Image: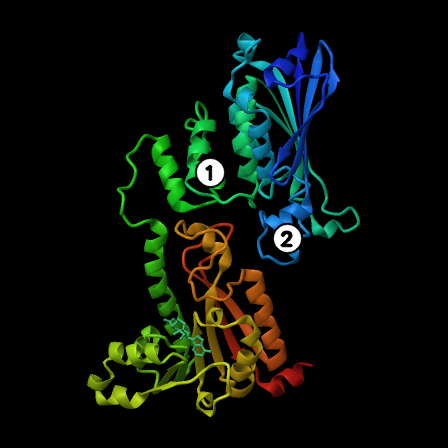
Amino acid sequence: MLLTITYTGQNTQDLGYLLHKNPSRPQEFALNYGKAYVFYPEVSDKSTTAALLLDIDPIDLARGKVGSTDGGLFDYVNDRPYVCSSFMSTAISKVFGTAMSGRSKEKQELADTPLALTAKIHMMAAPNQNMIPEIFEPLGYTVEIETFQSDDKFTRWGQSKYVNLMLSGTVKLRDLLNHLYVLIPVFDTQKHYYISSEEIEKLLSHGEGWLKEHPKCEYITSRYLNRRRSLINKALAQLIDEPEAEEGEQTEPKEKKLNLNQTRLRSVVDEVLASGAKSVIDMGCGEGNLTRLLIREKQLTKVVAFDVSFTALERCKDKLKVDRLHETLQNKLDLFQSSLTYRDKRFEGYDCACVIEVIEHMDISRLTAFTRVLFEFAAPGTVILTTPNIEYNVNYEYMKENTLRHSDHRFEWDRAQFTEWANEVCEKYGYKVEIKEIGDSDDENGTPTQMGIFEKQDMRMVVDAV
Ligand code: SAH
């Protein structure tokens, strides 16, 4: 990770005074996960370059679990130690903090003067690189972007998401440093720190004097705050001097979550009906929110529901008011206690099975047993299964770092993991799956819920096809 800043003009060695770093003496700084070095590869009257080099220790990183996403191999094999990302911002503020504030004991006048400066950011992680000019040009920079193929030997892999970025302009050094501090993480989708409300303070103080008027103010704010909607709203409210939401007012993610339950149940009922099913089994029915909707559908002549939890079933009976149901509905409905991880004859013979927000409550080691019980032994024509999409969790402000949506969740999958599991199931047990998204979508992380609709394939057709 390397950032260089070049000052051209006259007496350019003064850059050393502005940065508070002596050009004749390389310096080393300890960071949480490695070291930063400042040195000057070029010093002359006409042009002086300061370099900030970061040496991040990949093992420290993996052990500290910062920048990690899945706790697996990704912790060890990733781009974090090698690309200009949020680590660079942290280093800039640590190493050039005084310069960022615009103070200079020896050269205050120079610190307050726009200078001919060029910053080069080597290997910046920028999946959204088409936005680079739109972000830097309004700040007065000429932007040059050097792009690369992902791999020269495999051109079909397309363009790499890493770029070398060169920004030139006549700006105050403190402005350049503040721009870099805020904007490098805007392009980095994998920040190494937890985004909390403290980040609003940082954004507002480093964005002072330029962010509010920036034509992409909202985009920058949203990316900097990792798309956490409630933080973004707070920050934008402060930027445009609007009063914040009252304390205790419901935050948007919670509101969305309430709606999400209903949206999910509606989507499931629609899929059950679309499958043409006449009989359905609600597996892990909990308090029976889905069951209640299903029994009222005329197309369905049999609705069966079970749960492993006795208490959940009791609550389900209460909520459905089983004793007071109309006789036709009573005859249609069956409730019993059982577990999805053990084979049970009572699971067999239904057109459709719904497994709604259940698998994440099982130990992952029991998933193979569950898969066999459902797809091999019960083997209904259609399975509708939903589970959270962990990628979307960044939108829930109330969630703490490294936690799941519910204290009883044993795991949550990202979209790739769910798809991989679903495809394996299909291959093994002769199903075909269509994956759909449920809930509001955020442009990078998808929707809060993912749903798989599995259709059992007619084995004769499969054989014919082969
Ligand atoms: N499907 C319901 C409830 C989801 S909560 C709904 O969408 O509203 C998850 C439920 O799965 C809980 O009620 C829990 O008791 C049940 N569950 C967890 N492990 C189970 C298992 N092995 N067999 C059956 N149910 C299980």
Please indicate whether residue 5 sits to the left or right of residue 334 in the image.
Answer: right
* Mark 2 surroundings: few (<14), some (14-19) or many (≥20) residues within 10 A: many
The answer to which image quadrant residue 172 occupies is top right
| Above or below: residue 385 compared with residue 414 | below
- On the image, numbered disc 2 is attached to which residue? 75
Q: Are marks 2 and 1 in contact (CB under 8 Å)?
A: no
In this picture, is 387 found above or below 355? Answer: above
Quarter of the image where one finds residue 457: bottom right
Residue 81 drawn at (x, y percent):
67, 42
Of all residues shown, which one is farthest toward the right?
Answer: 153
Give how far across and how far down residue 87 sits, in percent. 60, 38
The quarter of the rendering in which ligand 1 is drawn is bottom left
361 or 231: nearer the eye? 361
Q: Which of these two is toward me, 149 or 68?
A: 68
Viewer-nearest residue: 433 or 414: 414
Q: Which mark is residue 219?
A: 1
Please indicate whether residue 259 sits to the left or right of residue 395 in the image. Answer: left
Please state which amino acid type lies under the numbered disc 2: Asp
